[in-house]
Amino acid sequence: MLGDKTPDEWIAAYAQGHRHPLNELTHLFGIPMIAVSLPLLLLSPFMAGLWPFALGLFVLGWALQFAGHAIEGQPPEFFKDWRFLFVGLRWWVKKISTR
């Protein structure tokens, strides 16, 4: 699926569209919000009242992503290649682990 580049090459390509400090900041919050929301949305049919919280995280996370890209002045990377949807969390882990 991501075979034409190494993980480091994907992260480097992703980072090219995330240079502005405010865009990075919105992604540092938005990416984990989206990542946490997905399993919560899957659990929500089994846990009363969970879906509004999960959906809120998902929507707010994506809003932060798009706000960051508006500041950056570039479209999200996944507009160019859908596989970048699977790179953001890797980029986030690398950012967090190198701080």
Image (spheres, helix red, strand yellow):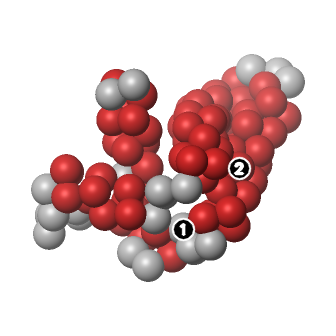
Residue 80 in sight in this render:
yes
What residue is shown with label 1?
76
Mark 2 crowdedness (10 Å alpha carbons): few <14, some 14-19, many ≥20: many
Q: Which mark is residue 6?
A: none
Mark 1 residue element: loop
- How crowded pointer 1 is (Cα within 10 Å; few <14, some 14-19, many 20+) is rated as many
Q: Is residue 28 above or below residue 21?
A: above
User: Looking at the image, which is closer to me, 68 or 54?
Assistant: 68
- For the residue pair 35 and 30, the one nearer the viewer reads as 30
* Residue identifier under label 2: 64
Single out the residue that lies furthest toward the bottom. 80
- Classify residue 48 as left or right of residue 85: right
The N terminus - image quarter: bottom left
Q: Residue at x 56, y 38 (%)?
A: 28
**In the rendered view, does 37 fall on the left or right side of 85?**
right
Q: CA distance from mark 1 to mark 2?
A: 12 Å
- Identify residue type, mark 2: Leu
**Given the image, on which type of amino acid does mark 1 rest?**
Pro
Label 2's element? helix
* Dots 1, 2 in contact, CB < 8 A: no
Q: Position of residue 72 (x, y in %)?
A: 60, 65
Where the C terminus falls, by quadrant? top left
Q: Quadrant of residue 98?
A: top left
Q: Residue at x 43, y 49 (%)?
A: 88
Residue 87, given in percent of the width and then of the height, sits at: 37, 52
